[in-house]
Image: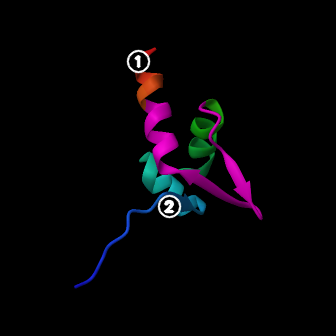
Amino acid sequence: MTQQFERIEVRGWKEVCRLLGVRDKRTAKKILTRLHLLRMYNRVPVVNIEAYKIASINQHLL
């Protein structure tokens, strides 16, 4: 029996772009900066998935 854990954050531009559904890291950076979710850890971007979901839903409601 194997357990699969939900990821709570993504690290690196490749994973961030995949989460946002964009191809370019500049576009991803622009989106995350607008939502105030861009966090860097040792020059590596880190995005909390739950925070992104909440912020993107709130952005669509405006």
Picture coordinates of residue 44 (x, y %)?
69, 62
Where residue 19 appears, as percent x and y from the top left, is: 44, 52
Residue density around tag 2, few if under 14, some if 14–19, many if 20 or more, within 10 Å:
some
Q: Is residue 22 visible?
A: no
Q: Quadrant of residue 32?
A: top right
- Camera-near label (2 vs 1) is 1
Q: Residue at x 77, y 65 (%)?
A: 42
Magenta stretch contains residue 51: yes
Q: Are marks 2 and 1 in contact (CB under 8 Å)?
A: no
Give the quadrant of the N terminus: bottom left
Q: Which mark is residue 15?
A: 2
Precedes in sequence: disc 2 or disc 1: 2
Q: Up-down: is 43 above or below 28?
A: below
The picture places residue 39, in percent across and down from the top left corner, at 69, 49
Label 2: which secondary element: helix
For the question of whether residue 25 can be seen, the reply is yes
Which residue bears the numbered disc 1?
61
**Of the residues shown, which amino acid type is indicated by label 1?**
Leu
Region in magenta: 35-56
**Outermost bottom residue:** 1
